[in-house]
Amino acid sequence: MKNVYSWIFIGGSLLLTNTRLQAQQFMGIKIKDHTVCYGHTTNHDFYVPPPEEYVQWKTGARTKTANIQVNYNGFTAQAQAAFQFAVDIWASLITSSQTITIDAYWQPLGAGILGGAIYTSAFANFDGAQKLNVFYPVALAEKMAGKNLNGTNSEIFTQFSSSANWHLDPGSPPPAGTFDLVTVVLHEIGHGLGFSGSFKILSSNGQGEVGVQSTGVPIIYDVPIKNGSNINLIEGFASPSSQLAGQLTSSSLFFDTPNSTNSRLFAPSTFSSGSSISHLDEATFNGTGDALMTPQIAPQERILAPGVALNMLNDMGWQQVFINHQALPNTENVTGPYTVTALVTSDNGFNAGTLRLNYTTDGNTFTQVTMAPTGLPNEYSAVIPSTGTPTTYGYFISVNDNNNRQFVKPGKFVRKQNTQLQALFVFEAGPDTKAPIISHSQKPFLLDTDTHLDIEARVTDNIGVASVVLEYLINDVPQTGQSFTLQNPGEDSIYRTTVNLGTGLANGDVLKYRIIATDNSSNSNQRTSPATGHYVLNVVGLAPTQNSYANDFNTPSDDFFGVGFSITTPSGFNNPAIHTTHPYPEGQGFPGGEYNYLYQLKVPIRIKAQEATLKFDEIVLVEPGEPGTVFGDPQFWDYVVVEGSKDGGFTWVPVANGYDSRDFSPWLTRYNSAISGNNSTAVGDPTLFRTRTLDLQNQFDTGDEVVIRFRLYSDQLAAGWGWCIDNLKIQIDETPPKILHNHTDYLKDEDDVLVITTAATDASGVESLKVEYNINGGAATEIEFDVDPPAATYTFSLAGLSTLPAGNFVEYRLAAVDSAGNTTTLPSSGFFKVPIINFSTPIATYANNFNSATTDFVGNFFSVAQPTGFSNSALHSEHPYSNGFGLDQTTNYTITLLKPITIASSNSLMRFDEIAIIEPTNLGIPFGSPNFKDYVIIEGSKDGGQTWLHFLDGYNARENSAWLGAYNTGSTPTPALFRTRLLDLKASGNFNTGDNVIIRFRLFATSSVNAWGWAIDNLYIQDATTGLENELASAIQVFPNPVVDWITIEASGLDGNVSVSMVNLQGQSLHYAEIQPEQGAVKHSINTSALPSGLYLLKLKTAKGTVIKKVAKVNR
């Protein structure tokens, strides 16, 4: 057939082809998806032994031909040993000069999933690639290129289920129902080495498509795939297209192997993502020695050799002939001849008789010349004769290995719906007038502590470079020039030189330089970089150390220096801030495939003992790491980090762990909202700002002088919008003083003194502390405390109050100011109100539905109110209630009934409806324990309020599942959460018949977590509605009573829903149900067998009223 050829870049020139302009562009991409291996359900007792290569290695008859290192995460010793067994098999079969690193995770996966794997990245158009514009899995690409391409990242990612029913012994057959881990690992590593394609059927339109992720560029596995009619899928079908989709589900696709039978691929009529095309056909290969890479692995299968899959991998490039050749440069010699030399080696040998130089002068007619040994090991050469006139020559080298596979240098372009296109090396013979090309990125600044300056440039020329020279000036004074040195002659074009700066330049000095390159031509063509003028490096030094620093960046300043950052106002932003370049560049093309963008504050910060915070607003749209990875993991990818240095910038430590777009869900959503290829094109805007606060004491000690910098790390293959930083505050005290105080809710009319004791603290020091009070809302009086020197507590006594009769009141509040001017008042608004009261004459009963204002209660932080969503008023705490602020950092919020109750001999019951969304304690922690945290409680006093005793134990949101649910979800309570509490005032044993008792409701709060609070409604104390008998009693029967196990409630003549509840005498709810009567009748049973012996209360709440029955529980 007629060959098709293409010219390619040589020496930076692009030449015409016989078809079109075309050039290689190195490409790389991170792989986001991975294959998943599901276990089959049917046992298949089948065994394929390890390959002979492994057996020979195991017995010492041969050495490994690949170095595969595994980073094990979470594996048991047995699982790791099985995994390593599979690794050793692959290491005996494939050949590579580059270390292959596998990240392996042993962790729970989804139901039925055994494991999964994929190559972590892929590369195209690298030196050594046989197919151009085609991705190769990273491990294969590095093998073919003979060098590392992905920095320190791993080549393969794998994960395996820690909960699957595994067989872990490589030396024995798996029992029924177990999966052989060695087999599954062999299978998954096979995918990671390249046994995985990019063909897919789009869910959006059902069309077939080829291309890694969204690039449209195929992976090497795709290239040889043909249908049953021998038509190559890439060359013969449009992508995307319905025709291609039909091929992918045709059950007739094959991997074209040049010198053996083509292998049928798995292409079922229903496309299965991750399985279709990327496996061998199950029906064809199951139960054969080639079964490893079929889509299903069954229990008891023990397949320890890849079979034909190894041949397929070798065809992709795992068996390679390496043609190491330095392309001929342009020359002014038109008489020739031109010698082409290549170093040729092979994994499995090659046929030297097929080693040929193929050259042309017109792009159409080629002359083949057999290349002969030069006498040096593995070196061969041939000559291209001259035409005698200025001419453009093109050539390529070809050779067949011992399996008769052809290899070419350079490779062939793979084209959609077209045949492959041979690329050519091109050089020109004739007079040269082209100057060298200089590529250089200048350093953005010099530190006054730098003792040397390294300068690097890439210099290329079509003829060759004669010299590269540096000219530089310091403060406009010329210095002695110096030459650059070519780092790897014959291999690259990197030139470097180092300028000795002695002990360093001074802050404010300026170093200017330019690079001059001269070529080898007769004309000595010359170029300078920059074209005019000089590169300018300003020398910067650190400013004097400060205790704090703040900058909103709205005013220009030179407090920062760095690279990749600037203070600017991009479109869509209203004010200047620190911004990286938008978008920030990938690390690809930089040393190690990574780059760090830096912005350093010139002002060192002296670390405070307290309030050592670094606070700023930010937007972070940088490439997210893989799910579950944390800072420092290999697949954490790009990140931002704030760092500090105690030695002036020589060594740096993170103030806190680095982070990426996953740190805030709106960032991640925005980053993923616009993906092109491997990059995010989404743009940040001010709605994405989020405040970050870091503690400098995490890494540094009080008194340390620390330099701060912001760093964005970018690796290769993916990038995004970048980082924005605004409103920077370092050790700026914005925290007001903390005031502690046990407040007073009332005074009795015989009390003469109101004692106000308080404490105030602040990291910056309390500048002033005062109490402000008034009588009956009159003129305020301020009392300043002497805070110098500071004291643990401060006390003010307001005397002479016994002259004020009941009905008067005192109001007071506390205020503190710190040295930074931050102010705190307690309470935060208004005053503590302290009424002068008298408790009334004891009464027998009390009832209040709180539908109108009442003066029956006294206390702060409670009120009769009707919050939004409630249909009636009730007694409410503040919503939410405040954290504790007392002297011990807890507070008791109380509301006290001013009417004492005389405990009755019968009907000594209190009933009320309540909602108690109070911070819950952990399960199993009893009331009274220090860890019980917040709670509410009902208490009584028999001595006029001097001492208080409980009617029942305290409780919180855990008392009721609906309350707990509201707390956990943070939802706003509604009246539907009201629950009725019924308690016997004598049940606790603290109170008896005839006692005159003051009753109060108390909410106890600690200093940390708070919640919505407490609502109390429909309060009845020894009221007729709490009686044991009423007009409904005759219609309700409870039996048996006493009860041993089941008790039954029957009622008739009812309308509407009925609620049935059962409580103990302490008011604890034991049972609750809502029942719809049938024809006015209700029958309901409760199992009491688990209850201890004792007295219980059954309550039936109906539309006509409430009935309460006492029930005696006995145990046999």
Image (cartoon, rainbow, N blue to C red):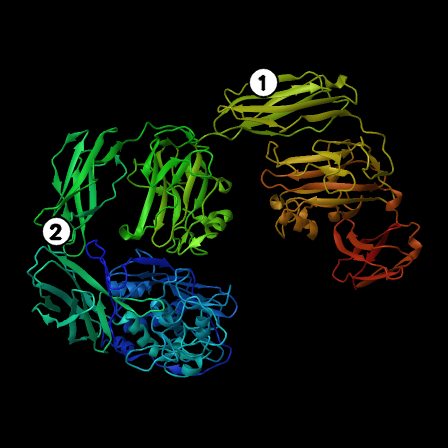
Q: In which quadrant of the rendered image does the N terminus lie?
A: bottom left
Q: Left or right? Give the position of 880 relative to 506.
A: right
Query: What is the quadrant of the C terminus in the image?
Result: bottom right
Q: Name the residue beneath numbered marker 2.
A: 432
Query: Which residue was labeled with disc 1?
Result: 784
- Say what secondary structure mark 1 lies in: strand
Disc 2 crowd, CA 10 A, few/some/many (<14, 14-19, 20+): some
Q: Quarter of the image holding residue 933?
A: top right
Residue 599 at x, y = what percent?
A: 35, 38
- Image quarter for residue 73? bottom left
Q: Residue 222, located in which quarter of the rendered image?
A: bottom left
Q: Can residue 991 be seen in this view?
A: no
Q: How dense is the environment of label 1, judged by Cα within 10 Å: few (below 14), some, or many (20 and up)?
A: some
Indicate the secondary structure of the residue bearing disc 2. loop
Q: Is 606 left, or right, of 916 in this rendering?
A: left
> Of callouts 2 and 1, which one flags the residue occurring earlier in the amino acid sequence?
2
Three-letter code, disc 1: Glu
Find residue 209 and report its horizontal and vertical position in percent.
Answer: 43, 66
Q: Residue at x 83, y 29 (%)?
A: 840
Instruction: Give the camera-side residue of 208 and 951.
Output: 208
Residue nearer the viewer, 609 or 30: 30
Against 798, is 945 above or below?
Answer: below
Q: Nearer the viewer, residue 1098 or 632?
A: 632
Viewer-closest of 835 and 633: 633
Distance from label 2 to label 1 (Cα)?
91 Å
Identify the amino acid type marked 2: Asp
